[in-house]
Image (cartoon, rainbow, N blue to C red):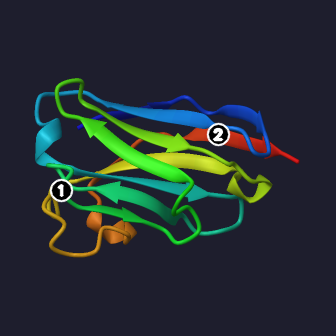
Amino acid sequence: VQLVEFGGGLVQAGGSLRLFCAAAGNTFSSYAMGWFFQVPGKEREFVAAITWSAVTIYYADSVKGRFTISRDNVKNTVYLQMNSLKPEDTAVYYCAASFSNAYGDRWLGAISQYDYWGQGTQVTVSS
């Protein structure tokens, strides 16, 4: 499956952004979806994940209460609503798809659980 992220940009601290990840193909509902971020020189880190049916959702502690992940299996899109943004949220954000762990039987915060990745979208939060 091909994934394309968009919606990144420059925002002031305290502001909001909504990221989108569109999937090509007709098997989107077969995948759990996740969002990760990466800053230069550091490893990619988990942000949020949602199982294929949206029954189970995971968040990193650093974004709980500020970010919301959701999906629309008709539109083949997963969303990341980012509120109360902080300068430390500045990073490239990637979406990813997991076929092998679509039901979330294993924790979806591990990079190894994902089969496909998008190219990333830059989010910059100014102080």
Q: Residue at x 18, y 56 (%)?
A: 55
Q: Residue at x 51, y 63 (%)?
A: 64
Q: How many marks?
A: 2
Residue type at the position of mark 2: Gln
Q: Nearer the viewer, residue 6 or 14?
A: 14
Q: Element type at marker 2?
A: strand
Q: Residue furthest bottom?
A: 106
The vertical placement of 3 against 99, above or below, is above
Q: In the image, is 120 to the left or to the right of 108? A: right
Q: Residue at x 24, y 29 (%)?
A: 76
Q: Element type at marker 1?
A: loop
In the rendered image, residue 69, in percent from the top left (x then y), is placed at 39, 48
Q: Nearer the viewer, residue 44 or 59?
A: 59
Q: Residue furthest right?
A: 127
Q: Nearer the viewer, residue 59 or 25?
A: 59
Packing grade of label 2 (10 A; few <14, some 14-19, many >=20) is some
> In the rendered image, which residue does mark 1 sit on?
55
In the rendered image, residue 13, in percent from the top left (x then y), is placed at 79, 45
Q: Which label belongs to residue 86?
A: none
Quarter occupied by residue 34? bottom left
> In the rendered image, which residue does mark 2 sit on?
122
Packing grade of label 1 (10 A; few <14, some 14-19, many >=20) is few
The vertical placement of 46 against 28, above or below, is below
Residue type at the position of mark 1: Val
Quarter occupied by residue 49? bottom left
Locate the N terminus and report the quarter of the image it occupies. top left
The vertical placement of 83 against 107, above or below, is above
Q: Earlier in the sequence, mark 1 or mark 2?
A: 1
In the rendered image, residue 5, in percent from the top left (x then y), is placed at 46, 33
Q: Residue at x 74, y 53 (%)?
A: 86
Q: In the image, is 97 to the left or to the right of 27? A: right
In the rendered image, residue 63, in percent from the top left (x then y), is placed at 56, 61
